[in-house]
Image (spheres, rainbow, N blue to C red):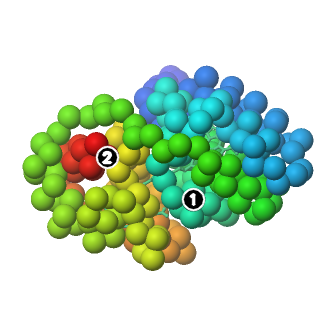
Amino acid sequence: MKRLVLLLSVMLVACSNDNAPDVSSEKAAADALQALQHSTAADGKALYAACAACHGAEGEGNAALNAPSLVNQQDWYLERQLLGFRSGLRGSDPKDGYGAQMQAIAKTLPDDNAVKAVVSYIASFKAKPAAKTLEGNIKRGADYYSNLCGACHGPAAEGNDTLQAPALAGVEDWYLLKQFNQFRDGLRGADESDRYGYQMGMMGKTLPDEDITKDVIAYIQSLAD
Ligand code: HEC
Ligand code: HEC
């Protein structure tokens, strides 16, 4: 009986983990892995066919699959993230289900030239700011942003390549919130050898609560107008 109770509670925990990919994204991942297994050439357009099911035909993203848009970010950042997934610096925490999914796909890209080729194909898409889904106190968010975030991400959240801090303006608000919380909770950027992720990991602890985090992200969203 004791064992049954234990088993049931383990199952409940598994079901309530909203970081576990759902059935439709598992299917899209399996299709992408299969497509990439047959790719050998560093042809960005052909490789991107395996990404489109989740990230959209023009890199616009798909919230239902938890896949962010890729068009509002710098090419050096996308490349570094793909290399981070490949080396296991990102997507290795057992609680980071979507990160693990993306890690498996990145590892199936044939080599670093393929990473460069797919990123330069993504860079040919037109940038388009994502729709707003979050409400927040923009004025309060602006204060926190300029005190704590702007020095790295830039006054207009346009990013800073010397500091390797990505652009945030125009990226989906739900994705920014999720990633910020992943840094805060140590699911991303906890490993000291992940130089830039670790820097941001420390920043993940600086906002006092979830309401203020939403204010900051609502402010970042307003910068994309
Ligand atoms: C099964 C769906 C799926 C497929 C297919 C997929 N991705 Fe992803 N990708 C995701 C998800 C989900 C995330 C967010 C991971 C997280 O939460 O950390 C992501 C994140 C990323 C990121 C990080 C973006 C950021 O802002 O940090 C990059 C870059 C990326 N994907 C590129 C690609 C490329 C290139 C391909 C094709 C070779 C691809 N993805 C295929 C689901 C997918
Ligand atoms: C010391 C410089 C620094 C400061 C200050 C900083 N960041 Fe970052 N941030 C980074 C770097 C570097 C990355 C990229 C991390 C990586 O490569 O994994 C990042 C990544 C992020 C991401 C993930 C973006 C994505 O597409 O996945 C979010 C969200 C974010 N920062 C929000 C914030 C917020 C909000 C603040 C202020 C509370 C802040 N950052 C302050 C350096 C900084």
Q: Is 56 positioned to the left or the right of 33 in the image?
A: left
Amino acid residing under circle 1: Asp
Badge 1 density bin: few <14, some 14–19, many ≥20, Cα 10 Å? some
Q: Which of 156 and 34 is in front in this view?
A: 156
Residue that badge 1 annotates: 75
Q: In which quadrant of the rendered view does residue 105 lie?
A: top right
Q: Distance between the residues labelled 1 and 2?
A: 18 Å
Residue 57 tag number: none
Task: Ligand 2: give its quadrant.
Answer: bottom left
Q: In which quarter of the image is the C terminus?
A: top left
> With 21 as the anchor, is 139 left or right in this view?
left
Answer left or right for 136 relative to 55.
Answer: left
* Residue to which mark 2 is pinned: 224
Residue 91: % across, % down: 57, 52
Q: State the image coordinates of residue 60 (x, y, percent, origin top left).
A: 52, 36
Which amino acid type corresponds to the residue marked 2 in the rendered image?
A: Ala
- In this rendering, the answer to whether 95 lies above or below 92 is above
* Mark 1 or mark 2, earlier in chain: 1
